[in-house]
């Protein structure tokens, strides 16, 4: 018996089975046998062939194989077309490394067409390894008719989908705060963002915003040394501050420390300022609304009659911080929405490369997430007597899952699919799904659907599918192509403004392009 066990060699048996399948073309015969039966739809989530397969891919391919064989044994026709994900930032970053390029500007200097040609070659770097792995684990896939995401055939399929989305009025251009990678120079979707969170310890800062004197606050007047306290974990956003937000029903306290009057939420006073406080008065947030304060930094372009005032906002809490939220309109979703509602000025103090622009001389040209930058900001606050204290703060922060750079929440023009309009339909469809494990239905997936956000789909890069959205630079009329043939219909539109074959028009990714350039892309 022991002798027989020693002769039992599972890998050897597997290889014999694989050889039998290959020699007798068993996969094709199984398809031929079931071709007239009811179809079970399977879409291969395509790998990127410019990266090597890992052990985790063995597991996912085994899962696929189990389901597909089971459905075939039930009598279904299960076509299994392989696919190759050949576009996107993972490919671009790999080519950047090969060429020694560091950013988008260097790609443009190298030449976008030349760069894309390199990318097209790079995507097939590990093709053989992927095919060998797939064959060795016994997953049957049709590699002979594999779809390729950079091909015109695939591009047109995507364009037809975008045209249908536009017809349903779900395609929208918006200026919103999006997760932005300053190194890659593009926005990320919420799906991508979820892949890059890390636990980090950053410097948080408590800031003293100086109220202008002689303003009525309840039963007293602000003096020359009256401050309202705010807290932030992103000190780099402070130069972009345009307003402060309080909760109108939250209780705040007037605390005297030396010659200074400090205003802080009642529930946070002891935590922020310590024991033995001299409390002079308790007031409500509504008593603070409309008060004006001195800007921390002089940034002329964000000055208006609405800037540097205190407003009511429903997102203010007292679970941490001071009960007063520093508001930088261009660098936070809540901030942006409040700013849009109030008509606050929208102006960037930071460029898309994550560096301060010349509007903030103290830190001009410096990267926002850098020690030197924080030190200069803190020193400036200290010199102005705006700094209360600095504390380390451990929290989850998003990084670009591709390159590891800190993500910035950054207001930018972007194209969106209006998923929020489909929220109720998505939730209803989820009720019909048999989830295993069951708790996912109302748990992680259900929560995601209930909070579903509009999907930011545009990327400001080079090696990807161009969005088929064309806008007239004069009248802003939008045309969405459903195919390459559709472009021939765009010579004239209702306002009789010519969009000729060689005339540059604005493409959705922000670059000027012509129809001929798009047609010749491959």
Image (cartoon, rainbow, N blue to C red):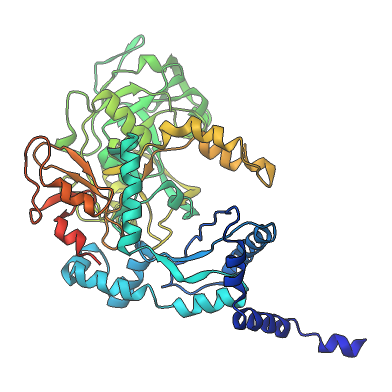
Quarter assignment of residue 65: bottom right
**Which residue is rendered at x = 16% and y = 37% of the image?**
477
In x, y percent, where is residue 154?
A: 35, 59
Residue 434 at least partly seen: yes
Quadrant of the image for the N terminus? bottom right
In x, y percent, where is residue 143?
A: 48, 72
Quarter assignment of residue 216: top left
In the orientation shown, which residue stands out farthest toward the front?
A: 36
Quadrant of the image for the C terminus? bottom left
In the orientation shown, which residue stands out farthest toward the top?
A: 219
* Residue 501 sits above or below residue 132 on the image: above
**Which residue is rendered at x = 8% and y = 56% of the image?**
502
In x, y percent, where is residue 335?
A: 34, 33
Residue 181 at least partly seen: no
**Which residue is rendered at x = 43% and y = 52% of the image?**
192
Residue 243 is left or right of residue 429, and the answer is left
The mark total stands at 0
In x, y percent, where is residue 113?
A: 20, 69
Which one is in front, 110 or 398?
110
* Residue 28 sits above or below residue 513 on the image: below
* Residue 318 sits above or below residue 76 on the image: above
In the orientation shown, which residue stands out farthest toward the right?
A: 1
Residue 192 is left or right of residue 291, and the answer is right
Residue 442 is left or right of residue 490, and the answer is right
Which one is in front, 101 or 459?
459
């Amino acid at each position: 018996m022991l002798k027989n066990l020693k002769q039992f060699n599972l890998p050897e048996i597997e290889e014999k089975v694989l050889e039998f399948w290959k020699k007798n073309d068993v996969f094709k015969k199984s398809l031929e046998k079931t071709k007239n039966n009811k179809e079970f739809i399977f879409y291969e989530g395509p790998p990127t062939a410019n990266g090597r397969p890992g052990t985790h891919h063995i597991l996912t391919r085994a899962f696929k194989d189990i389901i597909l064989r089971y459905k075939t044994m039930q009598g279904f026709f299960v076509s299994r077309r392989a696919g190759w994900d050949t576009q996107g930032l993972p490919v671009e970053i790999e080519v950047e490394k090969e060429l020694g390029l560091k950013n988008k500007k260097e790609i443009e200097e190298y030449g976008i067409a030349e760069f894309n040609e390199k990318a097209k070659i790079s995507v097939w770097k590990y093709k053989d390894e992927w095919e060998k792995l797939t064959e060795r684990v016994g997953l049957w896939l049709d590699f002979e008719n594999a779809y390729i995401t950079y091909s015109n055939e695939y591009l047109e399929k995507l364009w037809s989908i975008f045209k249908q989305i536009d017809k349903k009025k779900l395609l929208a251009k918006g200026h919103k705060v999006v997760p932005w990678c300053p190194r890659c120079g593009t926005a990320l979707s919420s799906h991508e963002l979820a892949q890059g969170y890390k636990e980090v310890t950053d410097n948080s800062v408590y800031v003293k915003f100086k109220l202008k004197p002689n303003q009525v606050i309840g039963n007293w007047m602000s003096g020359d040394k009256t401050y309202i306290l705010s807290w932030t974990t992103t000190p780099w956003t402070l130069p972009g501050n345009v307003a402060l937000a309080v909760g109108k029903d939250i209780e705040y306290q007037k605390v005297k420390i030396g010659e200074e009057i400090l205003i802080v939420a009642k529930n946070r006073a002891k935590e922020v300022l310590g024991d033995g406080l001299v409390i002079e008065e308790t007031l409500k947030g509504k008593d603070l609304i409309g008060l004006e304060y001195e800007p921390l930094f002089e940034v002329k372009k964000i000055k208006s009659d609405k800037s540097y005032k205190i407003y009511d906002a429903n997102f203010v809490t007292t679970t941490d911080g001071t009960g007063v939220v520093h508001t930088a309109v261009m660098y936070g979703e809540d901030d942006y929405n409040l700013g849009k509602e109030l008509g606050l000025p929208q102006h960037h103090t930071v460029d898309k490369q994550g560096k301060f622009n010349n509007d903030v001389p103290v830190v001009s040209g410096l990267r926002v997430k850098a020690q030197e930058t924080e030190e200069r900001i803190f020193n400036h606050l200290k010199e102005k007597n705006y700094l209360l204290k600095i504390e380390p703060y451990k929290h989850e922060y998003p990084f670009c899952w591709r390159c590891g750079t800190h993500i910035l929440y950054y207001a930018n023009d972007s194209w969106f699919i209006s998923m929020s309009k489909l929220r109720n339909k998505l939730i209803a469809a989820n009720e019909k799904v048999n989830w295993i494990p069951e708790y996912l239905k109302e748990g992680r997936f259900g929560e995601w659907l209930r909070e579903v956000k509009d999907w930011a789909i545009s990327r400001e890069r080079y090696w990807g599918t161009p969005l088929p959205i064309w806008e007239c630079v004069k009248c802003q009329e939008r045309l969405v192509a459903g195919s390459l043939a559709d472009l021939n219909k765009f010579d004239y539109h209702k306002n009789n403004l010519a969009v000729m074959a060689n005339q540059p028009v604005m493409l959705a990714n922000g670059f000027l392009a012509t129809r001929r350039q798009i047609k010749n892309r491959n």
